[in-house]
């Protein structure tokens, strides 16, 4: 008897095969703008479906290692990474995954919507980048921070061009050293101290507990300027060169040696993101330059970076969901059960269709956050800024959770093969689990949403969007319009009552529930807006999303019938 070997589906073209991505770009960029982006997107998609798949697998199979000493006993703290990781690094630069929104040409062509194009690049690049999407996010956050007028011109000129270079030989990424062992979410407990030096630079001393992209050339570190007092507001962002090459204190040290005062204690042994070096780093009088005036409370400046990394996190979640769905769907076409293709099973189709609804919602949320970010950066649009204040945490927290639940289903949809490491499927789940943790857990972001609602009236732009979308939905589906209008009314009432007593235990205990309800209603509105523009897939996704997440109804029957349209 011959041994059965399961055929593996061929790789898909993630740009050509993603109808929602393409129509989203058509709407946000216009036909000419989308046409101008097509070459870039097709090139990246070809790399993702081709050489970057192998690079991804290589980086996953060969995690980074820390070499503490050279053969002669000198401390080197070198992080060795795989060829695949280096290939991902080069591809990120070449395809302008970080650089795009900063390139004058791109700003000229797409204006604020350069961020929409960047989101599309991330959507294609992220899922099989071996989580190089993480250094990409932090490099973008650092570039946004360095672009602020408060930052010294000399510092900006020295570092920003490297962060946004499209030349792999020049491009660098950045880490961000915020979390300390005693306080990740609770930044107020940070104990890293910054002291001014005579030459205008600073020296940082402290311990950083989670430092991803620990191989990057620089990091943005939070430190408490000496004498500035307690709490989190006074924490200031500093740029720390990671290597001797960029540290003026490194007299006679070899290129590639760690900058004096920067010690890599160890690499974390993590559940996922295994190709990504995440280190514990000690700072002892490490050279640093301030990003903005350290005498001015700096957490607000650091939030520029954090908003960028949060929206990247949402993009990573949505991109991963779409890729997992594409693989699960392709597998269902080649896997046979009960006498037919798995993809013809009504039950399996319903499972995939439901996942497709979630993937569409996550994509719209992430896409909207990037569109707002672009409008804030180009033209300083105050309405976009007010909305982004609440959309960034909402998009991050809702997509992070969806990414984990979806990844679990994608793994299950491969049956036993989904649990076998070298199929590449298990990492979908392992890597998804970081998304609700770093850059703010669900609870921490929910409290941030509560603060935005109660202190900054951030509910107003959101409720206005929901009301407008309810009107747009009426010609598409009166039930959908009523659902959205009803959700908006209920949320309006809740916001009024939480604003009256924001620190009551009842309000605090309900913060996560409120944030998720806001995110689900916002997602419905975003899908409705896209549907009203003329996208049939979004119209169906909006109806099913609203039934699933606002009315808590079973959507299996529709998901099964309409899988092809949802896909
Ligand atoms: C793979 C990975 C990479 C990372 N990379 C980086 C990096 O590059 N740079 C960096 O600075 N950090 C990084 N982190 C750290 C990450 O940002 C923190 O772990 C995260 O912010 C949570 O902080 P914590 O670990 O101190 O957890 P804690 O804050 O102790 O949280 C523990 C639990 O308490 C809950 N909680 C906390 N505060 C509250 C509250 N006020 N109310 C209700 N519940 C609360 C949280 O939701 C969580 O469930 C990384 C983490 C991971 C897993």
Image: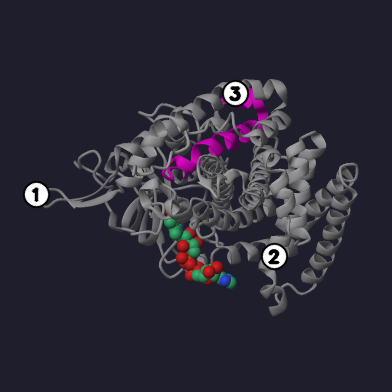
Magenta residues span: 104-133
Residue 266 % position (x, y): 28, 58
What residue is shown at x 54% (from left), y 64% (from top)?
232
**Foreground residue, 239 or 323?**
323
Q: CA distance from mark 3 to mark 1?
A: 53 Å
Instruction: Choose the circle earlier in sequence order: 2 or 3.
Output: 3
Q: Is residue 498 above or below residue 109?
A: below
Magenta span includes 121: yes
On screen, residue 164 versus residue 421, left or right, reads: right
Characterize the local packing of mark 1: few (<14), some (14-19) or many (20 or more) Cα atoms within 10 angstroms.
few
Dividing the picture into quadrants, the one containing residue 100 is: top right
Under circle 3, the secondary element is helix
Asked whether residue 228 is in view, the answer is no
What residue is shown at x 72% (from left), y 45% (from top)?
561
Q: CA distance from mark 2 to mark 3?
A: 40 Å
Residue 51 % position (x, y): 39, 30
What residue is shown at x 10% (from left), y 48% (from top)?
71
* Number of marks in picture: 3
Q: Which residue is mark 1?
A: 72
Magenta span includes 269: no
Q: Quadrant of the N terminus?
A: top left
Instruction: Choose the circle earlier in sequence order: 3 or 1.
Output: 3
Q: Which residue is mark 2?
A: 450
Q: Which residue is mark 3?
A: 38
Q: Report if the CB atoms under discs 2 and 1 are less than 8 Å apart.
A: no
Instruction: Choose the circle earlier in sequence order: 2 or 1.
Output: 1
Characterize the local packing of mark 2: few (<14), some (14-19) or many (20 or more) Cα atoms within 10 angstroms.
many
**Foreground residue, 266 or 57?**
57
On screen, residue 157 versus residue 250, left or right, reads: right
């Amino acid at each position: 008897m011959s041994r059965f070997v399961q055929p593996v589906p061929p790789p898909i073209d993630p740009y050509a095969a993603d109808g929602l991505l393409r129509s989203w770009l058509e709407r946000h960029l216009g036909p000419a703008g989308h046409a101008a982006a097509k070459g870039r997107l097709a090139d990246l998609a070809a790399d993702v479906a081709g050489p970057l798949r192998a690079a991804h697998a290589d980086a996953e199979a060969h995690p980074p290692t820390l070499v503490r000493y050279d053969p002669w006993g000198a401390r080197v703290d070198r992080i060795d990474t795989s060829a695949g990781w280096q290939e991902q690094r080069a591809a990120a630069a070449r395809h302008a995954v970080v650089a795009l929104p900063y390139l004058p040409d791109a700003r000229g062509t797409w204006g604020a919507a350069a961020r929409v194009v960047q989101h599309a690049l991330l959507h294609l690049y992220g899922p099989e980048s071996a989580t190089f999407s993480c250094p990409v996010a932090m490099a973008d956050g650092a570039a946004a921070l360095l672009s602020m007028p408060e930052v010294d011109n000399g510092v900006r000129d020295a570092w920003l061009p490297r962060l946004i270079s499209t030349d792999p030989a020049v491009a660098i990424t950045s880490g961000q050293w915020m979390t300390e062992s005693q306080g990740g979410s609770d930044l107020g407990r940070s104990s890293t101290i910054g002291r001014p030096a005579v030459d205008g630079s600073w020296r940082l001393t402290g311990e950083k507990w989670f430092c991803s992209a620990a191989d990057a050339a620089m990091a943005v570190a939070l430190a408490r300027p000496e004498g500035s007092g307690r709490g989190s507001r006074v924490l200031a962002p500093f740029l720390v060169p990671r290597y001797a090459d960029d540290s003026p204190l490194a007299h006679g040290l070899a290129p590639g040696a760690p900058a004096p005062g920067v010690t890599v204690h160890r690499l974390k042994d993590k559940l996922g993101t295994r190709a990504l070096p995440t280190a514990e780093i000690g700072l002892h009088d490490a050279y640093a330059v301030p990003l903005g005036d350290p005498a001015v409370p700096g957490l607000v400046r650091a939030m520029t970076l954090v908003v960028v990394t949060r929206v990247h996190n949402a993009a990573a979640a949505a991109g991963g969901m779409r890729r997992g769905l594409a693989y699960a769907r392709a597998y269902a076409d080649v896997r046979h059960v009960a006498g037919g293709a798995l993809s013809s099973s009504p039950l399996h189709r319903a499972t995939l269709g439901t996942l497709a609804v979630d993937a569409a919602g996550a994509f719209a949320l992430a896409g909207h956050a990037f569109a707002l970010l672009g409008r804030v950066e180009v033209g300083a649009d105050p309405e976009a800024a007010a909305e982004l204040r609440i959309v960034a945490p909402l998009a991050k927290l809702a997509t992070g959770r969806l990414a984990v639940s979806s990844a679990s289903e994608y793994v299950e949809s491969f049956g036993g093969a989904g649990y076998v490491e070298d199929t590449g499927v298990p990492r979908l789940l392992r890597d998804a689990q970081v998304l609700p943790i770093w850059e703010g857990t669900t609870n921490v972001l929910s409290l941030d949403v509560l603060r935005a609602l109660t202190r900054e009236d951030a509910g107003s732009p959101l409720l206005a969007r929901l009301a407008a979308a309810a009107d747009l939905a009426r010609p598409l589906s009166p039930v959908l319009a009523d659902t959205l209008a009803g959700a908006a009314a209920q949320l309006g009432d809740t916001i009024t009552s939480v604003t009256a007593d924001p620190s009551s235990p009842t309000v605090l205990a309900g913060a996560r529930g409120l944030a998720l309800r806001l995110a689900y209603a916002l997602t419905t509105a975003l899908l409705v807006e896209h549907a009203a523009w003329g996208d049939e897939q979004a119209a169906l996704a909006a109806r099913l999303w609203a039934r699933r997440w606002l009315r808590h109804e079973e959507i299996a029957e529709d998901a099964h019938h309409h899988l092809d349209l949802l896909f």
